[in-house]
Structure formats: structure tokens, C-alpha cells
Amino acid sequence: GRTVNGTAFSPDGKTVATVSGLQVLLFDAEVDRPGRALPLGDESGYCVAFHPDGRRLAVGERGGAALIDVGTGRVLRRF
């Protein structure tokens, strides 16, 4: 199996985000099917949290953090 380093529910409770290795996976909390993958690039993720609006994710990485747009999967900024 895959090691999951972090898990978070979206503010509305409809989406679960997990971070494992070089990607975040998004799952529908009510449907049992594979989720959508959001690649992190060259950095491994260790923890994940939703912004209160549910449209962005903060992902803790070894060297800092990444802010990700949930809709597009694009890394908006690295800290």
C-alpha cells in the first residue's frame, strides 16, 4: 500500500485530500472511487490543509509549503 502523510476534509465535508509522496489525491467523501491526482513536482508532501473557502490547499513540503488551486491543480505559490 501507499503511505499517506496527511489527510484533510474540505470545509463543506464533500472532499477528502490526502498527501503521499509527490502528489495530493482528492476523493469524493461520499463515493468509493479513485480520486484526482494533483502533482507536487519535485517536492514530497507531508501534510495538507484546506483554505476555509475550499478552493485552495496548503501542502507542507520538506523545504517549505505550496499553495495549490484545487480546481486546476496548479501550484500557485511556494513559500
Image: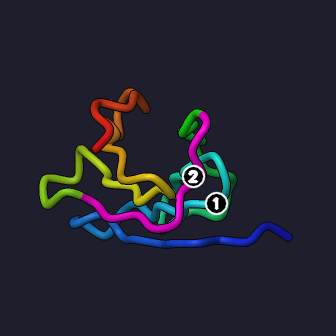
**Where does residue 61 sit, x and y in percent of width and height?**
47, 56
Foreground pick, 33 / 9: 9
Q: Which residue is mark 2?
A: 25
User: Taking 37 as reference, is 53 left or right?
Assistant: left
Q: Residue at x 64, y 46 (%)?
A: 22
Q: Residue at x 60, y 47 (%)?
A: 23
Q: Which residue is mark 1?
A: 20
Spatial CA span between label 1 and label 2: 8 Å
Mark 1 near mark 2, Cβ–Cβ under 8 Å?
yes
User: Taking 11 as reference, is 22 left or right?
Assistant: right
Instruction: Mark 1 or mark 2: name the one nearer the start of the chain.
Output: 1
> Which element is circle 2 on?
strand
Magenta segment boundaries in residue numbering: 42-50
Q: Amino acid at mark 1?
A: Ser
**Where does residue 37 sit, x and y in percent of width and height?**
60, 41
User: Taking 60 as reference, is 54 left or right?
Assistant: left
**Where does residue 30 sit, x and y in percent of width and height?**
49, 67
